[in-house]
């Protein structure tokens, strides 16, 4: 066992559907570590403890929790001239999305958070002139939830023909290629198309008169 | 990172760094160890209370309680000495293990401090409590694993000889003693990485495997560090032993006083500097030996995205 040590290439997108993993990620310090820092670059415990203002032991415990659920790996070990041995940790993916179904199954306020967030998204569309009445908010949330889940399912299963060459691409180029292909597979997916059409129909039906994209 | 194999230069550098960090963090270590000691005593008292309070009432109050322990002493004497019984002796060893388990945890959490120092050059005394809480059972298991690997073969050999009624003397006795000493040195070296591996989030079993694997793969580096610290401790206390052997008579008050002062100073140096340095050295060694040696990825072009949601 290598205990979270890896030279494995970075994934572009990972959808986390497991309720227990989602719960682990909902701890604020762990969420900061992974979503603010480790998805962007590799960091040592010392660097993270300085950035987050926590003691190194606490940061190490959080890193170990994140390693346990498989979203953080040890990237490399380096020794400084003063003799400190620094371990660099990084995320396993450039982007994470939390599966809504998994969030709904999780306890500790996660399910409520997911529900509230969906509701907030639907309500916030009013700033774009889309006023969904209270009586139809639940329905809108349901459509949006199915659409997001389908998108996550299709995007997280992006087929790669040449895995080796893919991981040799520079990160920015890989990101661009990945985005093009993610869009492409979504457009090819009939279920996603159906759900998107349903969602757009709902948006159109609640759009204020005079607001359009002419 | 430099290579993982041993050389005199590497060993000297390891010692220099370990002692430097130990001295730099002397106060944190001292406070941390006092904290650990207090928690350990509390844990032992709680454990004792859990067992003894129901027992106190079960045996019918203070008289029954005292009588119980007196009879327990008689039973222990019979089990281990006069009428040896392997099953009862195993139970006795198990009970002793349970008693010393809090000390295994106490040693383990000091490795947590060591890890923090090795990774970030500093630690805090309160950090030990986090390790205590998060790794209590793993560290207890690690201590038992170390005890089992080092001690069980010896207990088995000497136990069998004892039960069979053999008294090994002369040349066979000397060979047995030499083999026992060899086993202790070999196995203790093999188990040096158990606590650092547990602190690194390995389970007890995986930490034991990892420790054995690293100590074999990097035999020179692990054993040179381990034996150097053992030699340092031996040299520290050697003058005391030589002094006792050569000069000490019950009437010589001055020598006795000098030996006592030396012993107190040596004990302080051992607890406050040498043992923390050992913990730091082993934690650091573990980090180096288990670390991934790759150069940091160099990026030839700026990380700029051109594509949105196309």
Image (cartoon, rainbow, N blue to C red):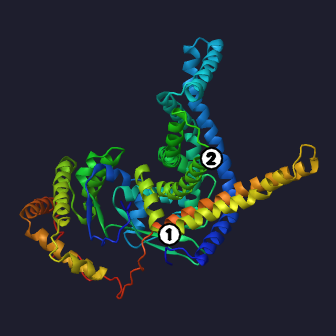
Residue denoted by label 1? B288
Q: What is the chain letter for disc 1?
A: B
Q: Residue at x 58, y 75 (%)?
A: B10
Q: Say what secondary structure mark 2 lies in.
A: helix
Residue at 87 percent across and 49 percent down: it is B248
x, y (%) of residue B306? 26, 83
The answer, for residue A44, to whether it is visible in the render is: no
- For residue A107, above or below residue B277: above
Judge by depth and name the residue closer to the eye, B283 or A26: B283
Percent across and percent down for residue B255 are 90, 51
Q: Above or below — where is A144 with respect to B61?
A: below
Q: Tell which of A171 and B69 is nearer to you.
A: B69
Q: How far apart in space, not on screen, are marks 1 and 2 (Cα)?
A: 45 Å
Labels 1 and 2 within one chain? yes
Single out the mark in the foreground, 1 or 2: 2
Q: Nearer the viewer, residue B184 or B160?
A: B160
User: Which residue is tagged 2?
Assistant: B170
Q: Where residue B9 sits in the image (x, y, percent)? A: 61, 78
Q: For label 2, count other residues whose C-alpha is less than 10 Å away and answer few (under 14), some (14-19) or many (20+).
A: few
Element under label 1? helix
Closer to the camera in the image, B195 or A98: B195
Residue A93's mark? none
Q: What x and y, as percent, mark residue B84?
A: 53, 28
Labels 1 and 2: the sequence-earlier one: 2
In the image, taking residue A167 as reference, residue B25 lies left or right, namely right
């Amino acid at each position: 066992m290598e205990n979270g040590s890896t030279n494995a290439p970075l994934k572009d997108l990972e959808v986390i559907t497991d309720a227990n993993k989602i719960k682990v990620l909902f701890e604020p310090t762990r969420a900061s570590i992974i979503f603010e820092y480790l998805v962007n670059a590799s960091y040592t415990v010392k660097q993270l403890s300085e950035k987050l203002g926590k003691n190194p032991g606490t940061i190490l415990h959080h890193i170990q929790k994140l390693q346990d659920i498989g979203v953080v790996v040890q990237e490399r070990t380096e020794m400084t001239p003063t003799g400190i041995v620094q371990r660099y940790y990084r995320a396993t993916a450039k982007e994470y999305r939390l599966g809504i179904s998994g969030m709904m199954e999780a306890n500790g306020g996660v399910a409520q958070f997911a529900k509230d967030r969906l509701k907030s998204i639907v309500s916030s569309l009013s700033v774009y002139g889309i006023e969904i009445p209270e009586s139809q908010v639940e329905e809108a949330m349901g459509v949006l939830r199915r659409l997001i889940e389908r998108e996550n399912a299709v995007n997280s299963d992006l087929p790669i023909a040449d895995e080796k060459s893919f991981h040799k691409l520079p990160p920015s180029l890989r990101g661009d290629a990945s985005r093009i292909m993610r869009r492409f597979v979504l457009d090819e997916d009939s279920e996603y198309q159906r759900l998107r059409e349903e969602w757009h129909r709902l948006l159109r039906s609640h759009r204020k008169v005079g607001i359009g994209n002419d | 990172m430099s290579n993982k194999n041993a050389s005199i230069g590497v060993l000297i550098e390891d010692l220099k760094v370990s002692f430097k960090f130990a001295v730099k963090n002397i106060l944190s270590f001292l406070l941390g160890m006092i904290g650990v000691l207090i928690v350990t005593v509390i844990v032992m008292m709680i454990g004792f209370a859990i067992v003894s309070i129901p027992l106190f009432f079960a045996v019918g109050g203070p008289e029954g309680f005292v009588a119980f322990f007196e009879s327990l002493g008689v039973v222990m004497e019979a089990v281990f000495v006069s009428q040896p019984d392997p099953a009862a002796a195993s139970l006795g060893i198990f009970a002793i293990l349970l008693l010393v388990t809090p000390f295994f945890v106490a040693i383990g959490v000091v490795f947590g401090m060591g890890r923090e120092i090795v990774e970030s050059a500093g630690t805090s005394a309160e950090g030990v409590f986090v390790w205590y809480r998060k790794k209590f059972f793993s560290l207890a298991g690690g201590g038992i694993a170390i005890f089992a690997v080092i001690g069980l073969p010896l207990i088995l050999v000497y136990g069998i000889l004892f039960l069979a009624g053999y008294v090994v003397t002369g040349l066979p006795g000397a060979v047995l003693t030499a083999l026992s000493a060899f086993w202790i040195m070999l196995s203790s070296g093999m188990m040096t990485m158990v606590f650092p591996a547990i602190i690194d989030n390995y389970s007890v079993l995986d930490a034991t495997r990892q420790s054995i694997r690293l100590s074999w793969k990097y035999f020179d580096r692990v054993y040179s560090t381990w034996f150097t610290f053992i030699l340092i401790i031996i040299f520290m206390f050697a003058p005391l032993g030589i002094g006792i052997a050569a000069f000490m008579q019950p009437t010589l008050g001055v020598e006795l006083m000098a030996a006592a002062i030396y012993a107190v100073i040596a004990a302080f140096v051992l607890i406050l500097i040498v043992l923390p340095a050992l913990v730091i050295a082993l934690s650091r060694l573990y980090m180096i030996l288990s670390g991934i040696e790759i150069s940091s990825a160099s990026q030839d072009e700026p990380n700029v995205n051109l594509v949105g949601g196309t």
